Image (cartoon, grey):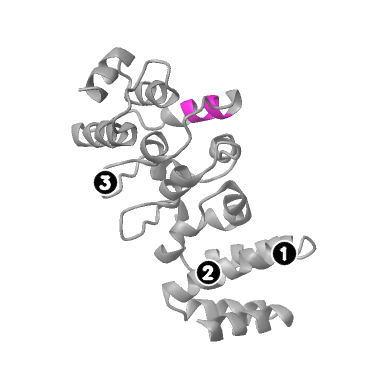
C-alpha cells in the first residue's frame, strides 16, 4: 500500500495525470480506495491544491468505477462535496460494498446533525445529471434498509432537523414511496432496537420521520415500536 501512495505522490508532483490514471486502473480495489483517501487528505491540507486534486479524483472515477472498498469513505458532506464531480461517472452512487451499502447508506448513517447532506443532495438531483442518485436512494442493503431508513433508524441524531434539511429529506422520500413488507419490518425493528428500553413518543423526530417515510399514522407506528 505504501508503494502505491508513494507512486501517487510522485505522479502528482510531476503532474503526470495520464500515467497516474494508468497506474490507478491497474490497482486492486483496496489500493484504489487508499489512493482516493490519500488524495482527499492532501486536498484538505492544501487549499491551493484543492481544486487540482478534486479534478484528479474526478478523472480517476471517470476512468474506473468507484471501488466497493471506497464506498464507506464518503461518510460526511465534506467528502461528498469533494468527490461529487467524479460521482456522476460509472453509476458511482449505485455501487455497493459487501454489506449491500451504497455510499448514501454510509453517509446517512454517519452524518452529523450540524452538517447534514440532504439539501446538498437534493440540489444535485435537481440540477445535475445524477440518475444513479435516485436509484441509490431506493437501494436496500443486506439489512433491508434504504439510505433514508439508515438515517432514521441508525443515525445518532435525535433532534429536529433544520427546516431546509427537513424539506430536502421529505423531497427525497418522495423518490422512494414503495416499501416492501420486509423493508417496512426491517426499518421498524431496527428503530425499535435504537430506542431499546426507552419509550418512543409522538414528538420524537425519528418517529415523525419514520411515519412520513412509511406513510402511516404516527399512532400506528408508535404501537409497533412500543409493543
Work out whether 202 lies above or below 129: above
Residue 9 left/right relative to 27: right
Q: Which residue is mark 2?
A: 63
- The residue pinned by badge 3 equals 143
Q: In the picture shown, does residue 225 fall above or below 136?
A: above
- Give the distance between the C-alpha atoms of the residues marked 2 and 3, in whole angstroms: 31 Å
Q: Of residues 59 and 27, which is closer to you in this image? A: 27
Which residue lies at the image location 26% right of the left edge and 46% below the top edge? 143
What is the quadrant of residue 190 in the picture?
A: top left
Of the two numbered discs 1 and 3 on the same chain, state the one appearing first in sequence: 1
Could you classify mark 3 by the number of other residues whose Cα lies within 10 Å: few (under 14), some (14-19), or many (20 or more)?
A: some
- Measured as percent of width and height from the top left, residue 25 is found at 49, 77
Q: Tell which residue pokes out farthest to the right in this image.
A: 48
Check residue 45 in the rendering and tell me which mark sits there, or answer none.
Answer: 1
Which residue corresponds to the image point at 33% horizontal and 27% vertical from the top-left? 198
Mark 1 secondary-structure assignment: helix
Give the number of the disc on residue 173.
none
Q: Which residues are magenta?
A: 165-170
Q: Position of residue 119 (x, y in %)?
A: 58, 34
Mark 2 or 3: in front is 3
Q: Residues within 10 Å of mark 1 (few under 14, many from 20)?
A: few
Q: For numbered disc 3, what is the local secondary structure?
A: loop
Circle nearer the N terminus (2, 1) = 1
Provide residue 124's location: percent of width, then percent of height.
57, 41
Amino acid at each position: 500500500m505504501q508503494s502505491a501512495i508513494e507512486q501517487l505522490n510522485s505522479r502528482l508532483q510531476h503532474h503526470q495525470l495520464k500515467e497516474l490514471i494508468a497506474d490507478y486502473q491497474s490497482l486492486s480495489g483496496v489500493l484504489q480506495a487508499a489512493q482516493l483517501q490519500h488524495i482527499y487528505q492532501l486536498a484538505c491540507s492544501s487549499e491551493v491544491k484543492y481544486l487540482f486534486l478534486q479534478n484528479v479524483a474526478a478523472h480517476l472515477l471517470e476512468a474506473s468505477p468507484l471501488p466497493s472498498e471506497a464506498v464507506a469513505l464518503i461518510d460526511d458532506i465534506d467528502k461528498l462535496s469533494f468527490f461529487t464531480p467524479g460521482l456522476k461517472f460509472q453509476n458511482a452512487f449505485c455501487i455497493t460494498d459487501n454489506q449491500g451499502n451504497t455510499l448514501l447508506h454510509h453517509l446517512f448513517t454517519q452524518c452529523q446533525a450540524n452538517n447534514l447532506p440532504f439539501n446538498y443532495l437534493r440540489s444535485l438531483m435537481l440540477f445535475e445529471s445524477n440518475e444513479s442518485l435516485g436509484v441509490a436512494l431506493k437501494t436496500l442493503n443486506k439489512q433491508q434498509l434504504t439510505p433514508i431508513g439508515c438515517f432514521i433508524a441508525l443515525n445518532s441524531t435525535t433532534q429536529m432537523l433544520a427546516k431546509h434539511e427537513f424539506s430536502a429529506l421529505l423531497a427525497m422520500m418522495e423518490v422512494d414511496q414503495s416499501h416492501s413488507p420486509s423493508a417496512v419490518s426491517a426499518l421498524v425493528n431496527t428503530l425499535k432496537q435504537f430506542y431499546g428500553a426507552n419509550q418512543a413518543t409522538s414528538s420524537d423526530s425519528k418517529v415523525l420521520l419514520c411515519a412520513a417515510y412509511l406513510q402511516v399514522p404516527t399512532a400506528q407506528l408508535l404501537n409497533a415500536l412500543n409493543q
